[in-house]
Amino acid sequence: MTPLAYQLSIADITAHLVAVELHFTPQSKEAITLSLPSWIPGSYMVRDFAKHLHSVEAFDDTGDLSLLQLDKQSWQLSHHQQQLTVRYKVYAFDLSVRGCYLDDQLAILNPAALCLEVKGMEAVPVTVNVVAPEFLDWQVATGLTRSSTTPPLQCGLYQADNYQQLIDSPLMLGKLDIAEFNVCGVPHYLVLAGHEQVDLERFKTELQRICLQQQQVFGSLPTDLKQYWFLCWVTDSGYGGLEHHNSTLLLLTHQDLPNAERPEESTADYQNLLGLCSHEYFHTWWVKRAKPAQFLPYRLNTEQYTSQLWLYEGFTSYYDDLALVRCGLLTQEQYFAALEKTINRVQLSPSEQVQSVADSSFNAWTKYYKQDENAVNAVVSYYTKGSLIALCLDALLRSKGLTLDTLMQLAWRTYGEPASGSSEQQFIQLCSDYAGKDIALELYSWVNGKSALPLAELLPQLGLHTAFRQQEHSKDLSGSKAPAYPVRSFGAAFSASTDGLKITNVPLASVAYKAGLMAQDQLIAINAVKATEQNFWRQLNQSQIGSVLTLHVFRKQRLVQLSMPVELAAETLTYLQLVDQDKATAWLGTTQE
């Protein structure tokens, strides 16, 4: 038995309980601290996984041992310095890629939310014995190293070099469909659980093209990558992904998958799924190996702050769809439409004038991951604006005959491959060394500033021109086609129901803000006509500019009357025009048919 041995078994499917046993021999006479992480790397919010842990007990050959809970996630274990067992159960019903989930169809086991850490033994080798559930013919897929005694994809013994590797290796149990492909000599596995129908061969083939494209950015696969797993959990609702050292866990719906009966169809949902796969695979280099020095090592009992998430998540967001168009899975037009949506999500939000991406990165724990109705006015996404910073930097570098790809390879060789971590200024200094101080200073200003990026000035370097039109409604984020009629301004977002229109957020300086509308208001009438989504837009857009509309809202069960001025919407929606195909081809690596 290795120094640390975990056993995972299904205790009660109906109650969603996973049983965990931990076996080890203490290395000293001192009392030992056991703890469970409060967050999982890659998702920067304290989640308090220990709230799902119960029935904790410890014993050795002499009988029960004393366990004293120290705080919400830690226990002090007194012992006799001989082999002992810690036993407990974990409630597993978190429909997300960050925790654990169990039902009669599958089990998703994230060791970060499941396996207690033994203080002082973080660096010792680990085994995990996955016990086969009774009466269920389930397989196992995981990036953990399989023991030689365990058949492929079967329950049995798995190994990790240390605790950090263990908690970075999710396990998927169930009836699985699996396809294998090769990238630069390294086996990759596409695994699906919970799905009904899928064109697995197409999904595998197109995923391989994405992986080959992403490794070209860095020049090679990481030398320590011996296998890679795409663990796809198919559900009725939900979407997301989380990167791991040699795997990714992806949550998707049935409609996201390619349809075997329609081999030529490429839906927007499937394109989004490919973009998600592309994003998480890029993290294999850019987060899992190249990362902020503050994360060396991860300290999972409390928040770890860095102002570099714009670089690691934002630049990854730039390269995810870029890989799709470079390997021919998106057309130029589709890519430009996606880029327009990103630009408009950033530029139409008042928060761009309030928060820098460096500040957004640092405060991810309490602001980005805990957004409320005021987020539109206060929180910049380091994902979306970070991706636009990468776009601008790529354009600026290309104006000098350089490329962002080359700069990424330089960063990879400097602190990614050596696993030394980056400081707050290191990437900007690398940019200065590669492209000159002026470009580095420009990058610094974008990262720390609170103003719009110079897209109009820089995008011509990529063969694009920016133009503007009216935004027809809040979901209108791309396309050059102007509305059929002059649009009146409103600004607020709402959700429609039979009770009226519930205001979800109110951007500062919008017409809705000027009228005094507040988030959570229930708009029930406009000019004495019941407020439905159709009636609202018809009344607003048929009203004369300069007139005033009467709104009736319920605000905490109080009936409130408001006056809203009718204003012509400004041309604030950005759309892109291709003006130089040669420059676009040099950037995207494609030719337009």
Image (tube, rainbow, N blue to C red):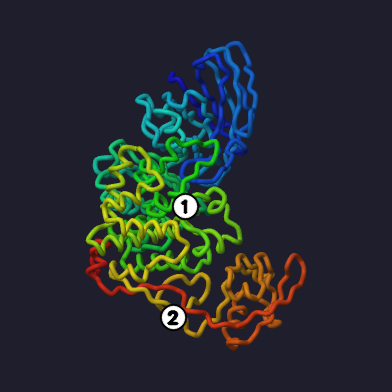
* Residue designated by label 1: 252
Residue 22 in percent (x, y) is at 52, 24
Amino acid type assigned to the residue bearing label 1 in the image? Leu
* Residue designated by label 2: 482
Q: Earlier in the sequence, mark 2 or mark 1?
A: 1
Nearer to the camera, 479 or 347: 347
Question: Is 100 situated above or below 199?
Answer: above
Residue 30 in percent (x, y) is at 56, 16
Residue 506 in percent (x, y) is at 60, 68
Residue 409 in percent (x, y) is at 27, 48
Nearer to the camera, 377 or 464: 377
Find residue 560 and report its image quarter: bottom right
Question: Is 244 situated above or below 471?
Answer: above
Instruction: Indicate left or right for 431 with 134 as reference.
Output: left
Query: Which type of secondary structure does the marked residue at label 1 adopt?
Result: strand
Q: Residue furthest bottom?
A: 544
Question: Is 534 situated above or below 237?
Answer: below
Amino acid type assigned to the residue bearing label 2 in the image? Ala
Local crowd size for mark 1, using a 10 Å CA cut-off: few (<14), some (14–19), many (≥20): many
